[in-house]
Image (tube, rainbow, N blue to C red):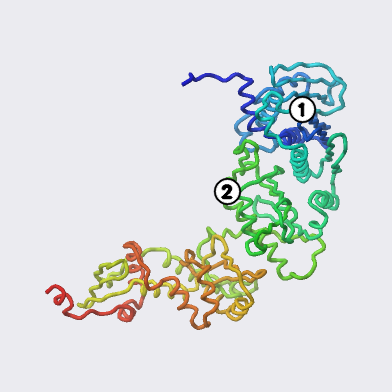
Amino acid sequence: MLPIQILPARLANQIAAGEVVERPASVIKELIENSLDAGATRIDIEVDKGGHKRILVRDNGSGIPEQELQLALSRHATSKITSLDDLEQIISLGFRGEALASISAVARLTLSSKPSSQQQGWQAKAEGRDMTVSLAPVAHPDGTSIEVLDLFFNTPARRKFLRTEKTEFAHIDEIVRRVALSRFDVAFSLKHNGKILRQYPQAMNEQAREKRVGLICGRKLMDDALKVQSEFQQLQLHGWLCTTPQPQNDVQYFYVNGRMMRDKLINHAIRQAFEGWLPADFHPAFVLYLQLDAKEVDVNVHPAKHEVRFHQSRMVHDFIFRAVRDMLEKISGTEGNEITQSHTLEPAEPAHDYIRPLQPKVSETATSYSGRSSGSASHSIAGASRAYQQLMNANKPSSTADVDWLMLRQRYLLLEWRQQCWILPLYKLQHHRLLSQINQGVRQPLLMPVSISADKTMQQHFQRLAEPLEKLGLELQLVRGKLLLKQVPAGLRNLNWSAILPELLYSEHNHLESVLANAASPEGATYDKAQAQSLWHWFVTTADWQDVISRLARPLPDNWLDDYAN
């Protein structure tokens, strides 16, 4: 085994370049972000041979002083952060100080710049072969130009992994589109092989911004787009969302504090919001912007900064889900009418359904914002609180419940009560408990809505049973041929609702409770000791347990033990 040693600077830079520089598009992304951090209002990109041969990014930003040019090409040299506190509240797109050093390690890089306070422009050149930097004066307008030639010229193994000119330019075009959607106040142009292919002028008003989105995402998509505007505490979500199903997922742009993102948490929230709204194998289209305090998000978790970590990830997830879902529900009533303009939604406050305590079913009159006294509402809340405590606490048996029991075969309780032995099936005890919970009217939201396809017959049954199902504690919605289940009676969230719902829908309304209880506690179910103990403790705290036990349990003959023993 070789001895441990410090890597040479050139080799270390080429390793770092492997994280930052994947292909020509990633070079352009890093250079454009530097231009935006420098306050540029115009950025021109020129590419030859799909970026294999030449890349040029020119801006009118603040520029780099002569004495800092050589330092700018060094690793971990940056003007954007100076302390750990800065790293914990990053507002710039770049901050590591690795991009220029990494690019110059695998290409021939020329950096020309002139700040407005400087009379003369200066140029720095570096090549990956020897990593030396040479300075020379140059005629240059205010701003910075960076030219990258012969990408991966000194790493043939990586160069051969580059795709065709057409494929690489398609990736470059997509990067420019994504950046152009993030900064409407900046003009962009893209030239390939000497021909201008993209021009996005500054968009300083709403009409101009919608025009740019239409140029990038397609005019037809914007014709069907809805404008989103939601706020909750320090979270703000705005942008456009198209409700027309798309066969491909190539029009999905999401930005966090102006930074383009492909984050799993964000994607999950949006997919969950669209659950039941899109046909199979179709995708939503959106351009959305999330703004929050820089201290609440960590962008230093991915080498290419494609993902972030939110300090309150559940709140962010629920806020995005709630905002998108509220918009979809607002337009569900207008389905069939053509939507030809953007709509602004009321601010959507996240529900935090999956961490909210159990919810009582309160009548409309109790929850309406009328001028009546709040006594009835307070009474309902107090009742719900008592029900919550009763459901969630494993209470000890009362002093009157001096009953010995033994569990048999994980399905029965053998009891000694009133000087007699009894056999009590645990499934009957669970069945009784479920019916009691259902009648208390306490509901719990599902972490993720359950969706099942509903044909015309099932839809008719749903319309017939909508009111009884609501009284049962089920919150159901019919959306585009699918039934969405959002809330269920307390304690029943873990059931297989995809299988139970059809059985409920094809039942008579006066049998719904028993059908649900039978599905939740089948006769052949088995229970462990902890489950049996929890059931028994709950049971003996009910007011009528002694009357119920004689109905649920079966008494054994007085001499059964003697007969068995002899």
Q: Can residue 61 be seen in this view?
A: no
Going by the numbered disc 2, the residue's amino acid type is: Gln
| Vertical side of 128 occupied by 383: above or below | below
**For residue 427, what is the image quadrant?**
bottom left
Q: Which numbered dot is residue 148?
A: 1
Q: Which residue is drawn at 31% across and 66% down?
A: 410
In the displayed structure, 478 sits above or below 106; it is below
Secondary structure at badge 1 equals strand
Q: Earlier in the sequence, mark 1 or mark 2?
A: 1
Question: Which residue position holds label 2?
Answer: 312
Q: What element carries label 2?
A: loop
Q: Distance of mark 1 from mark 2, alpha carbons? A: 40 Å
The image shows residue 491, relative to residue 424, as above or below, that is above
Label 1 crowding class (10 Å Cα cut-off): few <14, some 14-19, many 20+? many
At x 72%, y 37%, the residue is 163
Callout 1, which amino acid?
A: Val
Residue 25 percent across, percent down from the top left: 73, 37
The reply to whether residue 293 is visible in this rendering is yes
Q: Quadrant of residue 304?
A: top right
In percent of width and height, residue 180 lies at 79, 43
Residue depicted at x 74% and y 58%: 242
